[in-house]
Image (cartoon, rainbow, N blue to C red):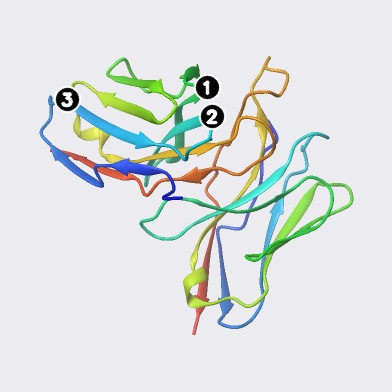
């Protein structure tokens, strides 16, 4: 199993541009989570999906952020327009919906908005 | 939500056991205790979890007190590669979900530094 796969690993973009982060969860996992990590705020949960359906997006900071999960093997987190304060490491994680299983995290996408 | 309290940092000598404490005095009966760690520049890594009984796997041991108000993660023979931030987390069921939906909330954790 290749684990949770995120792309790109690094993204540098100019303020105002659209940014799309991608995540492929572990096959068979039916819960997917997007986290953001900064030095100031630590790890923050942005949104999570169960069976491809968004369950809780209360952590999404603004309307500029949106997330989709069109199928069980793919999810995107989009920022439009991006701002310098969005600079962070974005992690995707997946797990099984039922049972007390741990999460498996991807390697993250380091986003820098200049 | 049950909150956790961990020391900000700890040191351990290479080859010795590392014992990382966590207090979770408001934990409820059906909440699990999870431990994760994050090595610099990597994603968090699941280590172990438990409900009431002590647990052991290839990475670590988890000791939960009888009243479940605290726990200790034990790395039996710490190596330099175990230097990381260790997070103690209590599983939080989503409100109104009946426990079927849940999320993990990360605190600041403990920075464990293993010294040669």
Instruction: Report x, y in % for residue B47.
Output: 60, 56
Q: Secondary structure at mark 2?
A: loop
Chain label for disc 3: A
State the residue in front, A69 or A83: A69
Are the residues flagged by discs 3 and 2 in contact, CB closer than 8 Å?
no
Q: Please rate how many residues cluster around mark 1, counting C-alpha atoms within 10 Å: few if below 14, some from 14 to 19, many from 20.
A: some
Q: Is residue A52 above or below residue B60?
A: above
Contact between marks 2 and 1 (CB within 8 A): the answer is: yes
Which residue is farthest left? A14
Residue at numbered disc 1 = A51
Taking depth in this image into account, of B1 and A7 the one nearest to the observer is A7
Labels 1 and 3 share a subunit: yes
**Residue bearing the label numbered 3:** A18
* Residue position for label 2: A30
Q: Is residue B29 above or below residue B65?
A: above
- Front: mark 1 or 3: 1
Name the residue located 25 percent from the left edge and 38 percent from the top edge.
A87
Residue A110 to residue B94: above or below: below
Question: Based on the displayed image, in which of its 4 quarters is residue B112 positioned?
Answer: bottom right
State how far apart marks 1 and 3 are (Cα): 27 Å
Q: Chain of mark 2?
A: A
- Residue plotted at (46% across, 45% down): A105
Residue A20 position within the rendered picture, expressed as x and y whole percent measured from the top left: 24, 29
> Residue visible at 41% across and 50% down?
A2
B54 horizontally vs B98: left or right: right
Q: Give percent across and percent down for residue B52.
A: 84, 47
What's the CA distance linking mark 3 and mark 2? 28 Å
Q: Residues within 10 Å of mark 3 (few under 14, many from 20)?
A: some
User: Which chain contains the residue that carries disc 1?
Assistant: A
- The picture places residue A49, in percent across and down from the top left corner, at 49, 23
User: Which element type, helix, strand or loop, lies under badge 3?
Assistant: loop
Q: Is B59 on the left-hand or right-hand side of B68? A: left
């Amino acid at each position: 199993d290749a684990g949770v796969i995120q792309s790109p690993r690094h993204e540098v973009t100019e303020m105002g541009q659209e940014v799309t982060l991608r995540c492929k969860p572990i096959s068979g996992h039916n819960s997917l989570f997007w986290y953001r990590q900064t030095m100031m705020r630590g790890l923050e949960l942005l949104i999570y999906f169960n069976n491809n359906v968004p369950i809780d997006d209360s952590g999404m900071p603004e309307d500029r952020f949106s997330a989709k999960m069109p199928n069980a093997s793919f999810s995107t987190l989009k920022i439009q327009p991006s701002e310098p304060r969005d600079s962070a490491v974005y992690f995707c994680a997946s797990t099984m919906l039922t049972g007390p299983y741990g999460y498996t995290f991807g390697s993250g996408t380091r986003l820098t908005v200049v | 939500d049950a909150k956790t309290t961990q020391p900000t940092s700890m040191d351990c000598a290479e080859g010795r056991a590392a014992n990382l404490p966590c207090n979770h005095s408001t934990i409820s009966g059906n909440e699990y205790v999870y431990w994760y760690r994050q090595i610099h520049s990597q994603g968090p890594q699941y280590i172990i979890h438990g409900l009431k009984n002590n647990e052991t796997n290839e990475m670590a041991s988890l000791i939960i007190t009888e009243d479940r108000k605290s726990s200790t993660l034990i790395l039996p023979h710490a190596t330099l590669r175990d230097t990381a931030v260790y997070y103690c987390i209590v599983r939080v069921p989503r409100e109104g979900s009946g426990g079927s939906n849940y999320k993990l909330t990360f605190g600041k954790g403990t920075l464990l530094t293993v010294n040669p």
